Image (spheres, grey):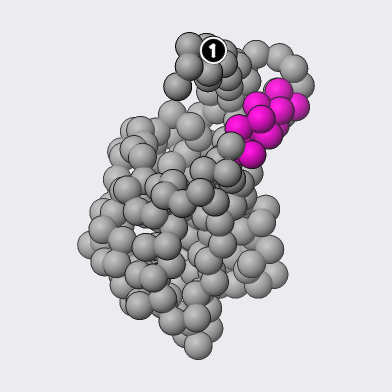
Amino acid sequence: MTPLSKRALRALDQFNAAYPWDHNAHYHQWLMRQLPQRFDTALDVGSGSGELVRLLATRANEVQGIDSDPVITAQAQRLTSLSTPGTFTVADALTGIPASSYDVITCVATIHHLPFIEALTVFRKHLAPGGTLVVVGLSRAQTAGDYLLGAAASPLNAATGWLKNKGRRAPRPVSMTALTRPADMSFSDIVSKSHDVLPGARLRRRLFWRYTLVWHRH
């Protein structure tokens, strides 16, 4: 990498830090379009500060959010109205799911922190017949297509941050305060292993370094 390229990347990083936005929340409305208009119960795995739980609660009779971080879980509960049918529990995603089954299970930017096949197997076990699982995840760039998509996303990422913040510098959103780590699985590995556990699952690469998975249990 040339010195000019390094300076350009540093400048882009500084710009993105000045105009932050939540890449995961960007997919919330898309996620909701994958779900029925009404459903009884929902589970959000890795619920963080609770934005998706509150959104799911507009369609569900009961929503449970689980997260392993007690600080962010307490914050999510404080941010959630008492009239909202959503509750939050500090729990392990593999062993601490509160109920036996749910009509909807969501998992956004969390599954790369978990053993992938084991996590999908647990989600399948807790998904009710006729239920829908939606995952928004991160994958490791491996192919030329991955790198091209990432390169295309970089200027869009900066433009989106500037527009969402209306050209004003802003602090990081509450939903972005949780610790994260890079993904270690490539998209092709994710597709292969997903189909082993969830036959018929639909997976797609997405902008902003994400992929999506949708699976309906028959």
**Residue 218 screen position, x and y as percent:** 50, 88
What stretch of residues is rendered in magenta?
A: 152-163
Front residue of 51/139: it is: 139
Residue 99 seen in render: no
- Residue carrying label 1: 4
- Is residue 200 at all visible to an observer of this figure? yes
Vertical side of 166 occupied by 182: above or below? below
Among the 4 quarters of the image, the one containing residue 35: bottom right
State whether residue 28 is above or below residue 130: above
Does 182 sit left or right of 14 as displayed?
left
Taking the spot 64% from the left edge, 67% from the top edge, the residue there is 34
Total of numbered circles in the picture? 1
In the image: residue 189, left or right of residue 51: left
Neighbour tally class for label 1: few under 14, some 14-19, many 20 plus, Cα within 10 Å: few
- Provide residue 142's location: percent of width, then percent of height: 42, 49
Q: Is residue 4 magenta-colored?
A: no
- Give the residue displayed 35% in from the left and 76% down from the top: 197
